[in-house]
Image (cartoon, rainbow, N blue to C red):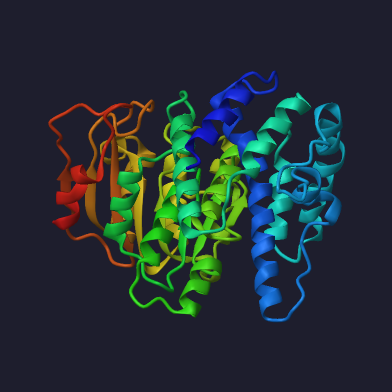
């Protein structure tokens, strides 16, 4: 239904001087897509309000509404040929629209509102589509997309994930954006979150873990209205340092049906571990912190076990931020199990004495395209020391790679056992 539209948009951006890479294509598609989504959301809310005899105040002022600047329509439903284009459109977007949307952050009641998210996103983004004519073509294509029915949203989220996956294959830092979905689904199944749990990913990337946990919990039998509201507002929490990943994560969750995702744009590791209190803790941690990152000395000061290895700092953060009895599934380099340096040894001791590391899933090389590292998944519960650990080595009779990725069938036996 929408696949060709996405391809056509990429073709237009490919010829624009301002967009040079797959990452630019996704970023630029995202902001236009977000404004179209917002317009559909507002229409739906207005309809609901009118049906119950109430009035609805739109979030966006008229001049900046999609139907005003992007897609003003003639009576027969076609886009008005006099709609802004060329330099007029580029100037409107750069000089008026973006500055207007940026003000939402300062004016929002709190960080959990959609208003705050609008402001946050447009403070982080620039319009890189230099030609107003190219932008007009992109806007016209995106105007054809619909977010109204469940099937439409589902297809849209599926295509968007496909774009994130392409980014993951697009180069050495693409892996920040993409953890194989088959692996995420497996981790979610094993951790088995319940409605009412708070679920946290401090290295959210494109929010794959939060999205899959949402999909998993939506299948709960006899979901009540209050359960659905809990899932919308008080279940999923994330933090992400990088602007582009943050925007993609928000967009990914929105397309999957979480209206105002609780993802904060911040460096998780800048928080001192000693400052984490009981009220800050979560029931469940699901995460794949970055491989091979290095942190500066001042960031390391926030942690009792000092190490430059980003993932090892994240693991300390995750252990600390879990509630007593809380459960975690965390992907980490397999060298964590064997490194002999002081920090690794101290961190293993910390994990084994404060948590029950009940399962380790050893993944084959090539699970992460482009990353070239061997990884394991640590499954643990906080509160009791580890007595014994079940170690499962996943051996496959084929080599994994871009064209032959890990699939759910590969992991089915592990889940059953």
Q: Position of residue 357 (x, y in %)?
A: 26, 56
The one of 183 and 285 positioned closer to us in this rendering:
183
Q: Residue at x 15, y 34 (%)?
A: 396
Q: Position of residue 381 (x, y in %)?
A: 31, 63
The one of 157 and 113 positioned closer to us in this rendering:
157
Determine the residue located farthest toward the front in the rendered image: 76
* Count of residue discs: 0
Q: Quadrant of residue 105?
A: bottom right
**Does residue 98 appear left or right of residue 185 in this picture?**
right
Q: Residue at x 27, y 63 (%)?
A: 385
The one of 54 and 410 positioned closer to us in this rendering:
54
Visible residue check, residue 112: no
* Above or below, comparing residue 289 to residue 21 in the picture: below
* Above or below, comparing residue 137 to residue 219 in the picture: above
Visible residue check, residue 286: yes
Q: Position of residue 125 (x, y in %)?
A: 70, 38
**Does residue 102 appear left or right of residue 316 in this picture?**
right
Q: Residue at x 72, y 31 (%)?
A: 135
Q: Position of residue 392 (x, y in %)?
A: 16, 46
* Above or below, comparing residue 393 to residue 352 in the picture: above
Q: Quadrant of the C terminus?
A: bottom left
**Does residue 219 appear left or right of residue 131 in this picture?**
left
């Amino acid at each position: 239904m929408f696949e060709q539209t996405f391809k056509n948009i990429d073709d237009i951006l490919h010829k624009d001087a301002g967009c040079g890479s797959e990452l630019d294509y996704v970023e630029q598609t995202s902001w236009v897509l977000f404004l179209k989504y917002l317009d559909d959301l507002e229409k739906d809310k207005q309809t609901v309000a009118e049906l119950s005899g109430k009035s609805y105040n739109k979030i966006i002022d008229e001049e900046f509404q999609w139907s005003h600047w992007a897609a003003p329509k003639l009576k027969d439903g076609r886009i008005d040929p006099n709609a802004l284009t060329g330099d007029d459109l580029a100037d409107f977007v750069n000089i008026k629209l973006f500055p207007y949307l940026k003000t939402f952050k300062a004016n929002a009641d709190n960080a959990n509102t959609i208003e705050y998210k609008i402001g946050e996103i447009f403070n982080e983004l620039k319009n890189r589509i230099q030609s107003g004519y190219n932008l007009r073509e992109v806007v016209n294509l995106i105007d054809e997309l619909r977010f109204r029915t469940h099937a439409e949203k589902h297809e849209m989220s599926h295509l968007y994930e496909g774009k994130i996956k392409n980014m993951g294959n697009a180069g050495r830092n693409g892996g920040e954006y993409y953890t194989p979905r088959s692996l995420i689904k497996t981790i979610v199944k094993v951790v088995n979150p319940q409605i009412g749990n708070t679920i946290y990913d401090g290295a959210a990337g494109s929010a794959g873990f939060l999205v899959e946990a949402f999909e998993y919990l939506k299948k709960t039998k006899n979901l009540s209205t209050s359960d659905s509201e809990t899932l919308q507002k008080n279940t999923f929490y994330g933090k992400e340092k990088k602007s582009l990943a943050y925007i993609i994560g928000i967009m990914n969750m929105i397309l999957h049906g979480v209206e105002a995702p609780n993802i904060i744009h911040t460096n998780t590791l800048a928080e001192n571990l000693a400052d984490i209190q009981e009220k800050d803790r979560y029931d469940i941690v699901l995460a794949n912190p970055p491989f091979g990152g290095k942190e500066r000395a001042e960031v390391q000061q926030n942690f009792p076990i000092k190490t430059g290895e980003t993932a090892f700092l994240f693991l300390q953060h995750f252990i600390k931020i879990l509630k007593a009895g809380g459960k975690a599934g965390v992907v980490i380099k397999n060298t964590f199990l064997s490194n002999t340096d002081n920090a690794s040894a101290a961190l293993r001791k910390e994990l084994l004495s404060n948590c029950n590391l009940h399962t380790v899933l050893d993944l084959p090389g090539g699970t992460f395209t482009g990353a070239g590292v061997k990884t394991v998944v640590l499954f643990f519960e906080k509160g009791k020391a580890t007595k014994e650990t079940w170690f499962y080595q996943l051996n496959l009779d084929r080599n994994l790679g871009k064209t032959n990725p890990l699939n759910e069938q590969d992991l089915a036996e592990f889940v059953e056992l």
